[in-house]
Amino acid sequence: MTDSAERKMQFLFALRSKGVTDARVLTAMETTDRRDFIPGGVFATRAYEDMPLPIACGQTISQPSVVGLMTQALNPQPRDKVLEVGTGSGYQAAILTRLARRVYTVERHRRLVTEARANFQRLDLTNVTVMLGDGSHGLPEQAPFDRIIVTAAAEDPPGPLLAQLRQGGIMVVPVGQSDTVQRLIKVTRSPHGFEYDELRPVRFVPLVEGLGKD
Ligand code: SAH
């Protein structure tokens, strides 16, 4: 077996051992090379390790097992329209493009928007749209969404996002103070209101208001 094939097998094994067992999610992650979303340099060789890594603008590309567990909890379906808040590198969004019909992803740093857009073009991912903006307001012009995933930590699930979730829809969001361990929450919208399930502790960069300066 080649080195890269072996690394990828280990990558999938690590995902499974951390509880990512959904076959569709594993396939989507197998076909989305994390290396494509990590800027060149010292960290490129660590693309297949199960750890967050730094990207531009002081942000991070999330840990693969956390990406897998969040995607599994989100449970996107082939006809779904999905909103992601916090594009970062575009890795999570790229995985979602393989599981849903349409993905909108919002990022507050212009540089990350440009880089993620270039990545999607290079990889020929055409069912994703990246937008510059403060994603805590959601994307009213595209609402409602079947699924919403927030990849930065909010103190509470943002009201505008709850409002833009379709009946029967699911939102996954890390909740808590930014400098501590946060709780990953799954919100399901039913005819009777919102149901909240606490999934696991996580650690994300904070959801910040307004646009970044770069
Ligand atoms: N999903 C990303 C990881 C995101 S890190 C990936 O797969 O690589 C969290 C990202 O959320 C950062 O890029 C940060 O700039 C962005 N972010 C924080 N607050 C935001 C907001 N209010 N609106 C949009 N993006 C935000």
Image: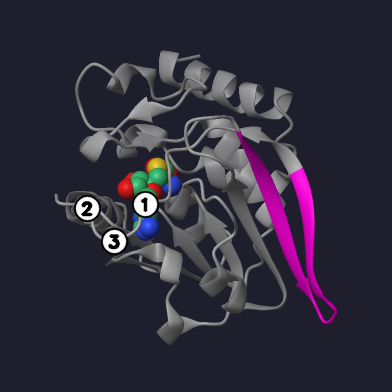
Question: Looking at the picture, how far across and down is residue 193, in whole percent?
Answer: 79, 75
Q: Are marks 1 and 3 in contact (CB under 8 Å)?
A: yes
CA separation in Å, label 1 and label 3: 7 Å
Q: Are marks 1 and 2 in contact (CB under 8 Å)?
A: yes
For ligand 1, tell me if the residue under mark 3 lies within 8 Å: yes
Report the residue at 30% width, 56% height from top. Answer: 120
Question: Does 191 appear in magenta?
Answer: yes
Q: Residue furthest bottom?
A: 141
Q: Is residue 24 visible?
A: no
Q: Residues within 10 Å of mark 2 (few under 14, many from 20)?
A: some
Q: Are marks 2 and 3 in contact (CB under 8 Å)?
A: no
Report the residue at 37% width, 26% height from top. Answer: 53
Q: Residue furthest left?
A: 214
Give the answer, above or below, for where 181 lies relative to 26: above
**Residue tagged by mark 2?**
212
Q: Is residue 6 found left or right of 44 in the rendered image?
A: right
Main secondary structure type of the part rendered in magenta: strand
Question: Looking at the picture, how far across and down is residue 147, in whole percent?
Answer: 61, 67
Report the residue at 72% width, 23% height from top. Answer: 17
For ligand 1, tell me if the residue under mark 2 lies within 8 Å: yes
Question: Looking at the picture, how far across and down is residue 192, in whole percent?
Answer: 85, 79
> Label 1 amino acid?
Val
Give the answer, above or below, for where 156 lies relative to 128: above
Q: Which mark is residue 35?
A: none
User: Considering depth in this image, is 156 or 16 the residue closer to the camera?
Assistant: 156
**Residue tagged by mark 3?**
210
Q: Which mark is residue 208?
A: 1
Asked which quadrant contains residue 54, the reply is top left
For ligand 1, tell me if the residue under mark 1 lies within 8 Å: yes
Residue stretch in magenta: 182-198
